Image: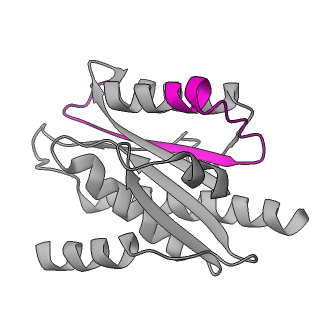
Amino acid sequence: MLIILLLILAFISSPVTAGEDETNVLIVYYSKTGNTQEMAYAVAEGVQSVKGAVAVVKSVEEVEKDHLVRADGIILGSPSYYANVATPMKEFIDKWYFEYELPLFDKVGGAFCSGGSRTGGQELVVISMLIAMMNNGMIIAGPLYEAWGTFGATSMTETPPHDGVDEYELADCRLLGERIANVAKRLNCSR
């Protein structure tokens, strides 16, 4: 399993230059234990499943202004700390507002979150990140509106029977990536 994850990491994080007709989806995450990072790469798999979509996975520390400018879609991932967005992710969001002064009106956004327990506040963190996107004029889209009406993908990583992110939760991450890539691609085609 670890070898497969490393191969996926190498494939997805390798530099890819998006062509004019490609849809570029930036996946930005903060991860302390590796769970949110694992979810980020599952989101990237979903993006890559859409023909013409390119996934770019970056930790919050790696993202530069140009990454945000080039992205057609932006998906944020953070662990939940007592129902709060992790500080590095909050600082990243503040940076795009205050330092970069970027209007992201033509971008599609989504969010995902990992958390230790069933009531760890994952949904609140997803909603907080989505509100930040909406306040910046982004269009938000979730993975499962048609089926269950969820806003993003979440995981419960510590409460038994879980030990990390399970396959069901990774499948939700893939749906999120696919959904954002499809919506961003449709918007690209209409421009």
State the residue at coordinates (43%, 56%). 172
Identify the image quadrant of the C terminus: bottom right
Location of residue 24 in the rendering, given as x and y in whole percent from the top left corner: 62, 65
Look at the image and name its color scheme: one colour
Verify whether residue 27 appears in magenta.
Answer: no
Verify whether residue 96 appears in magenta.
Answer: yes
Q: Is residue 88 left or right of residue 175?
A: left
State the residue at coordinates (56%, 27%). 99
Location of residue 93 in the rendering, given as x and y in whole percent from the top left corner: 50, 30
Q: Is residue 132 left or right of residue 6?
A: right
State the residue at coordinates (75%, 33%). 137
Figure check: 18 above or below 74: below
Q: How many numbered circles are shown? A: 0
State the residue at coordinates (39%, 32%). 89
Q: Is residue 88 left or right of residue 128?
A: left
In the picture, residue 101 is in which quadrant?
Answer: top right
124 or 184: which is nearer to us? 184
Work out whether residue 34 can be spotted. yes
Q: Is residue 99 left or right of residue 13?
A: right
Location of residue 142 in the rendering, given as x and y in whole percent from the top left corner: 59, 47
Work out whether residue 147 can be spotted. no
Figure check: 66 above or below 111: below
Location of residue 72 in the rendering, given as x and y in whole percent from the top left corner: 68, 57
Q: Over which residues does the magenta segment extend?
A: 94-120
Identify the image quadrant of the N terminus: bottom left
31 or 111: which is nearer to us? 31
Work out which residue is located at the far right of the displayed protein and give it: 191
